[in-house]
Image (tube, helix red, strand yellow):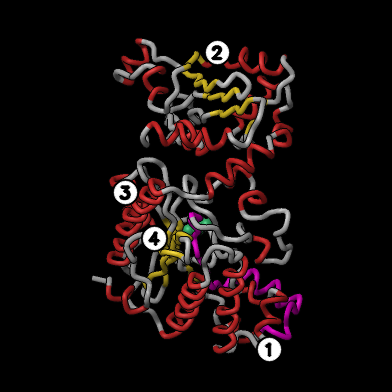
């Protein structure tokens, strides 16, 4: 946990947005893998961690604005628990670390909520994403579980998003820690990925690094010679000389902050001439979009810069033809770059995605495009100092998408399908870094992980 005052101050800032009512926070429960006593690795809800710090299942918290109270509800461990789990601090001791003096058994939460509702006051809560919390809210509030999301408090969502979007110094330090672990994961993969190995030999080893140095991975590892599948979690392919492997992986710090890095590496230590050409375009797109990042600039602009660099590079190689602005405006480049440039990162790798991308990345003024590719952009609005964003352009040759577009003659005025056909087995290349927006510009966080062609090749031992 951070120091007590961090949590006290975070709640103080949040409370300034409200005059009355109550703010309800539900922590996460253990989630059974195949039977209740064999749960998945426990992960606390990120907003609960942010405001209350308690990293344990079965807790809830309430800010009663009218009564001026902050309360944690949870469990004290029984002697049976202690026999299986070892000695545990009391709920009171645990809550005190977050600056909370008032604690009750979780069984009292319902009475507390009823009391507030009976006085006609509003209960604000965030949209739940776990079924058990939907059921809990159904029981507490009397709203059908399947509809509960519609009743989440927009006011609370907006206040939490505004606050969590701006990272403080101690949060940046945690992200840098997670990036140190990612450095080790990625340089390991660069050194030891060999022809004749299965992908899982590398993905398993780097997951081990994340577990040994931090709190495990921040999302399931993508390590694949089929990088054209954007989120490819299959690790069973045999790797051969000439293949390229997309390694999109990151770690969680001990306080649960994420890193999210992608590098694309040659399985045999050297890129082919064709791979180098495509790789350099992706790297140029990444560097040029990062260069544009500063407060006030829309992240959509950075995305479109990357799109134009990709379109220009692919036009030089003969995959595209025609006016670059028209290609990007129409979305023809999305055959090769079908996803968004990046997303907020913090306690969640896609930070606050549970609260709704429309709040995190869009606003009343900045609306989501419905164009294929651009529609996947998770964040379009203006950057602010303190934002931490991923920047992750890529070029992919997705056979199914090529076939579909070709059959529809889609953008045939811009796309040279006969050239594209020759690359249908190419795979994909993505390069991703984590960037802090500063007062005057930006800073790429973490120790530099090799990404220039010669630097990646030089890592092979
Ligand atoms: N790690 C998944 C992503 O880059 O969004
Ligand atoms: Mn990633
Ligand atoms: Mn990412």
Q: Tell me the residue that label 1 is attached to.
A: 322
Q: Residue at x 33, y 73 (%)?
A: 456
Does residue 400 show up magenta in the picture?
yes
* Badge 3 element: helix
Q: Tell me the residue that label 3 is attached to.
A: 208
Residue lying at the far top of the rendered structure = 79
Instruction: Compare marks 1 and 4 and give the one earlier in the sequence.
Output: 1
- Crowd band around label 4 with a 10 angstrom C-alpha radius: few (<14), some (14–19), many (20+): some
| Apparent side of residue 444 relative to residue 48 in the rendered image (left or right) | left
* Badge 2 element: helix
Q: Position of residue 135 (x, y in %)?
A: 64, 25
CA–CA distance in space, label 1 to label 4: 37 Å
Q: Nearer the viewer, mark 2 or mark 3?
A: 2
Q: Tell me the residue that label 2 is attached to.
A: 107
Residue labelled 2 has its Cβ within 8 Å of some atom of ligand 1: no
Q: Position of residue 297 (x, y in %)?
A: 58, 66
Q: Which mark is residue 461?
A: none
- Which of the two residues, 439 or 178, is positioned nearer the viewer here? 439
Q: Nearer the viewer, mark 1 or mark 2?
A: 2
Q: Residue at x 62, y 55 (%)?
A: 361
The quadrant of the picture occupied by the N terminus is top left
């Amino acid at each position: 946990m951070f120091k007590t005052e961090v949590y006290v101050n975070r709640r103080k800032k949040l409370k300034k947005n409200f005059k009355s009512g109550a703010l309800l926070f539900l922590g996460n429960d253990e989630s059974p893998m195949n039977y209740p006593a064999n749960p998945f690795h426990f992960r606390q809800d990120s907003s609960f961690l942010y405001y209350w710090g308690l990293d344990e299942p079965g807790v809830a918290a309430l800010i009663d604005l009218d009564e001026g109270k902050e309360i944690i509800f949870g469990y004290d461990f029984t002697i049976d628990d202690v026999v299986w789990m070892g000695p545990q601090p009391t709920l009171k001791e645990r809550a005190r670390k977050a600056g909370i003096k008032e604690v009750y058994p979780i069984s009292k939460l319902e009475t507390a909520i009823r009391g507030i509702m009976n006085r006609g006051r509003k209960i604000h809560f965030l949209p739940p994403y776990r079924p058990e919390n939907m059921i809990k809210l159904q029981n507490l509030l009397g709203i059908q579980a399947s509809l509960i999301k519609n009743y989440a408090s927009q006011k609370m969502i907006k206040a939490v998003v505004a606050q969590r979007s701006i990272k403080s110094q101690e949060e940046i330090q945690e992200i840098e820690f997670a990036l140190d672990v990612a450095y080790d994961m990625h340089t390991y993969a660069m050194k030891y990925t060999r022809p004749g190995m299965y992908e899982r030999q590398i993905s398993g080893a780097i997951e081990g690094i994340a577990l040994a140095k931090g709190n495990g991975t921040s999302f399931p590892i993508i390590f694949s010679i089929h990088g054209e599948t954007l989120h490819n979690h299959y690790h069973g392919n045999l790797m051969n000389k000439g293949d390229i492997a997309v390694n999109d992986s990151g770690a969680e710090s001990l306080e649960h902050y994420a890193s999210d890095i992608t590098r694309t590496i040659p399985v045999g230590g050297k890129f082919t001439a064709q791979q180098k050409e495509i790789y350099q375009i992706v790297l140029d797109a990444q560097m040029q979009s990062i260069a544009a990042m500063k407060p006030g600039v829309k992240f959509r602009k950075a995305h479109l810069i990357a799109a134009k660099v990709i379109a220009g590079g692919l036009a030089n190689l003969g995959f595209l033809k025609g006016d670059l602005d028209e290609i990007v405006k129409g979305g023809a480049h999305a055959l090769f770059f079908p996803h968004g440039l990046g997303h907020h990162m913090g306690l969640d790798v896609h930070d606050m995605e549970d609260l709704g991308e429309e709040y995190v990345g869009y606003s009343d003024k900045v609306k989501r495009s419905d164009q294929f590719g651009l529609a996947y952009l998770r964040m379009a609005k203006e950057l602010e100092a303190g934002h931490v964003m991923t920047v992750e352009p890529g070029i992919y040759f997705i056979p199914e998408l090529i076939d579909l577009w070709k059959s529809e003659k889609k953008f045939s005025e811009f796309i040279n399908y006969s050239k594209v056909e020759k690359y249908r087995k190419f795979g994909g290349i993505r390069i991703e870094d984590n960037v802090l927006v500063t007062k005057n510009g930006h800073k790429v966080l973490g120790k530099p992980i090799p990404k220039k062609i010669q630097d990646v090749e030089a890592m092979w031992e």
